Image (cartoon, helix red, strand yellow):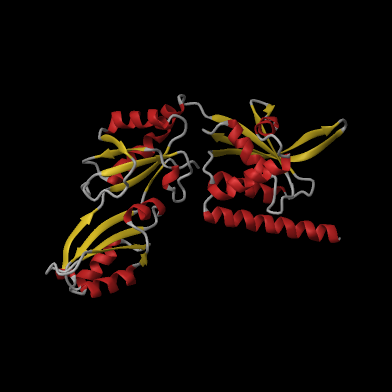
Amino acid sequence: MLSLVRSGPESLVLHATDKVAEIKKSLNEWGSHISLDPERALGIYGNNRRIIFFISSSNLLTEEEEEETYVSENSIELLLCTLINRRLISGVEEVKMMPGFIMMRLLGNIENGIASIHKDLGGEIIDRDPMFRNYIPGTSSVVYFTQKAINRAVSVQDMYEKALLIHHRSKGAIIQYLSVRGIEYLGDAMGTPDWNDVEIKIYDANGHFDLHRQRLWMAAQGLQIGVVLAERWGRDQAMVMMSVPIYLVKIFTPMEVQEIKRIAMGLEYNEMGQRFADFDVFFRDKKVSAYTELESHPGMTRNEIGMLYRNEIMKNIDFDSMKELLRLESIIKEKSEIKSNN
């Protein structure tokens, strides 16, 4: 399935002027101290992390303020309950919720998509940077945009230069709204509501169709390229009087067909640079040729281009999907070695 919107990391500013050592102990039990400033932390961590920006200073103003960042998978509420139960709240000068962090995926002309959302939800279009804005009330939310898959943390470099600041709507309400109308806004950005209906035919002389099918599923899921509509067995005419078995996967995608071709070329190769299957892409009953890729990479062989795109897949896919891809390739390698030895 194609995910178009998700939450970002929840974050909070905690300022203490007393009982600093005890509060730090609680923070270390809650999460981990990291050597990142707030700006970098917000740009690295995804929706399954919570961030505390801890400021400590003496209430006698005899010491300079110290700023530290803590990150955890535990809820912020758990930390606050711990501070209350340990009677440490008296040492806290101020607690301030950061604005809600929302990540949305758009393709094509992102500016057009933002304009449509802005028209419907209001707010104001702002620069993406800085991401650390502790002067914005916690009742507001900032929607950031990217063309990359959002099932993993998105780096600042992959975020669009503009964001949308929305006041007086909860983060949950905004996410629910964008989840319902996300396809519409994606169409506004792409300039058309039409998606591409592509077919990928898997060929493998060694017959490891199920494993290659799973690899394609992992790539489709990890790169968030679209929706798998159908799968079926078939046969293809290899030459006169001879046909070969194939496995066909039909994908409904907002991505350009040539981008799907690049992903298919990358899936044809294992980590050793060996081409161990064919993934042919068909659009409107016509095979998408690799010629465009060969032409755009003068001096490179087809194998080198395939490995280039394999590396792109591994760089952009989420960690769990990458691990599963490598596991499936390991199984294919073992089966091929057994077959060759017999």
Figure label count: 0
* Position of residue 150 measured from the top left corner of the image (x, y, whole percent): 45, 45
Instruction: Examine the image and state in which quarter residue 238 appears.
Output: top right
Specify whether 226 is left or right of 199: left
Foreground residue, 20 or 242?
20
Q: Which residue is outermost to the right?
A: 241
Query: Which residue is at a point 74% across and 46% down the rendered structure image?
Result: 275
Instruction: Examine the image and state in which quarter residue 166 appears.
Output: top left
Instruction: Examine the image and state in which quarter residue 10 appears.
Output: bottom left
Query: Which residue is at a point 24% across and 75% down the rendered structure image?
Result: 21
* Residue 14 in the image: above or below residue 150: below
* Residue 82 in the image: above or below residue 137: below
Specify whether 154 is left or right of 24: right
* Position of residue 44 measured from the top left corner of the image (x, y, whole percent): 41, 53
Specify whether 151 is left or right of 174: right
* Position of residue 107 measured from the top left corner of the image (x, y, whole percent): 46, 34
Foreground residue, 109 or 67?
67
Foreground residue, 136 or 213?
136
Query: Which residue is at a point 46% across and 48% down the rendered structure image?
Result: 151
> Which image quarter is the C terminus in?
bottom right
Foreground residue, 128 or 8?
128
* Position of residue 297 measured from the top left corner of the image (x, y, whole percent): 66, 35
* Residue 11 in the image: above or below residue 226: below
